[in-house]
Image: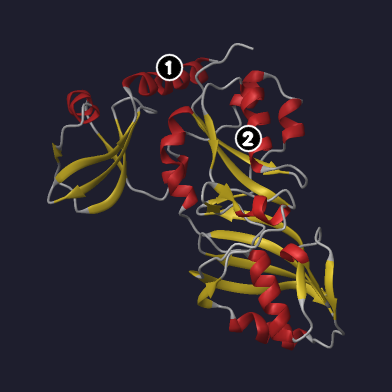
Amino acid sequence: MPRRAVHGVLLLDKPVGLSSNDALQRAKRLYRAEKAGHTGTLDPLASGLLPICFGAATKFSQASLDADKRYLATLALGQTRRGGDLEGEVLRTRPVNATRADVEAACARFTGTIEQTPPMHSALKHEGKSLYEYARAGVEVEREARRVTIHAIDIVEGDHRRWLLDVRCSKGTYIRTLAEDIGEALGCGAHLAALRRTGSGALTLQGAVTLEALEAMDEPQRDAQLLSADALLADCPEVRLGAEDAARFLAGMRRRLALADAPQVRVFGPEPRAFLGSAHIVAGELISTRLLSPTEVQGLVVNDRTERTA
């Protein structure tokens, strides 16, 4: 299948049962894209928002990896399971006497900055292998606790044994570990029965598309689903340069601007969609952080012209 240069961000609604890499490869084939990558692993058990970057957008995937996340987590009380989720064998069953007030109090204990020990069933690497590979082989690896931040845990609905929680947290938070910890705080144990990612930074499931929907589209319809290549930096201020300054900036040269200091900005040339890359501003100087290639910029401009004349 002939590949093509595709630039932009796809908000994919990943289904349960598919790994993030499998979802990525299917989307890449559908778009016939030369280059693609996702912005944060979702377990096969989990569904929801998986931003996929194509072409020039892959250079800014770290912004989404570092962003806060939001999940709908279904907590099942009364059973602890191997791996902390519904797929693992039952290790222990205990009676459940938790009220809504008890669950709210337990959730409050884990709000703020906490330490978590990564679960064995995770994609975290140890000596070049993912922890879940060791877990499948029955090997336990010592893990160091890491600091994460839980911004809020709200009860959406629930009763007695099953509770749906809206969790807003920092990157690197393991929701299955959070579920187990809440269960232990309640004295009855718990596991994660379902998980759906609903947000990553400023991106949400609004406008997200499934693989099945993409498969039913033709190529122009699929392309219309893509956000711009700078979508992962949408919260950053925009700086627009004239043709001469844009060319020099793209060559890595600093530009003098009468602008306030800023840790990160999006830089554009004179064309509407001529995204050049990211930069920071210090003492009136625009200093590049991550630049697109001239070929990538030209691709964005040509695609924009094509869309406007279609």
Residue, disc 1: 302
Q: Residues within 10 Å of mark 2 (few under 14, many from 20)?
A: many
**Where, by quadrant of the figure, is residue 141 drawn?**
bottom right
In this picture, is 5 found above or below 60? Answer: above
Residue 82 location (% of width, % of height): 77, 65
The residue under the point 44% across, 46% down is 62
Residue 180 location (% of width, % of height): 70, 73
Q: Tell me how far mark 1 sits from mark 2, CA to CA.
A: 25 Å
Residue 271 location (% of width, % of height): 33, 24
Quarter of the image for the N terminus: give it.
top right
**Where, by quadrant of the figure, is residue 276 drawn?**
top left
The residue under the point 59% across, 84% down is 109
Q: Amino acid at mark 1?
A: Val
On screen, residue 2 versus residue 234, left or right, reads right
The residue under the point 39% across, 23% down is 296
Q: Amino acid at mark 2?
A: Leu
Q: Secondary structure at mark 2?
A: helix
Which label is found at residue 63?
Answer: none
Residue, disc 2: 24
In this picture, is 170 found above or below 204? Answer: below
Residue 36 location (% of width, % of height): 54, 30
